[in-house]
Image (cartoon, helix red, strand yellow):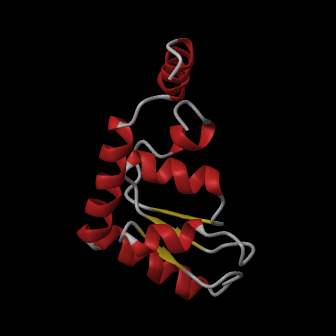
Amino acid sequence: MRGSAAAEELNDVTAVLHHGGPDLAFAAAAHGVPAGMVPERPDRPWAERLAAVGAGIALPAGERDPAVTAAAGHWLSSDPGFTAAASRIRDETAEMPTTAQVAQGLVTAAADGG
């Protein structure tokens, strides 16, 4: 997500509410931003996965009540536990190798016969 349009928009926010797609879910996690997600379809697992680790709230698929989404946004931005969990994901992600590093490791291992 580094350098993507979604990632750029998350630099100065305390929480994000979105449709539960992978781009915004991963961008929010990579930036340490808690996410409230209203999946467009029930087959999007990101909302439940981020909620399970405390980095977000999974609202029912298709939720359209403005009061419910507003309450979720308030809860996300006022409860420091969500930010702490999202920050842990950000920190863990930052420590992971890049795809280029993984690819180079595979090339090296293949060349060494491993």
Which one is nearer the viewer's eye here, 1 or 49? Answer: 49
Corner quadrant of residue 11: top left
Corner quadrant of residue 19: bottom right
Which one is nearer the viewer's eye here, 53 or 100? Answer: 100
Quadrant location of the N terminus in the rendered image: top right
| Position in image of residue 77 (x %, y %) | 35, 68
> Seen from this angle, which residue lies furthest right?
41
Tell me: 70 left or right of 80. right
Number of numbered discs visible in the structure rendering: 0
Tell me: 55 left or right of 100. left
106 up-or-down from 83: above or below: above
Q: At x 38% / y 36%, what residue is drawn?
A: 96
Q: At x 26% / y 61%, what residue is drawn?
A: 84
> Seen from this angle, which residue lies furthest top?
111
Corner quadrant of residue 85: bottom left
Which one is nearer the viewer's eye here, 91 or 99? Answer: 99
78 up-or-down from 26: above or below: below
| Position in image of residue 108 (x %, y %) | 50, 15
Tell me: 113 left or right of 23. left
Q: At x 37% / y 69%, what residue is drawn?
A: 53
| Position in image of residue 8 (x %, y %) | 52, 37
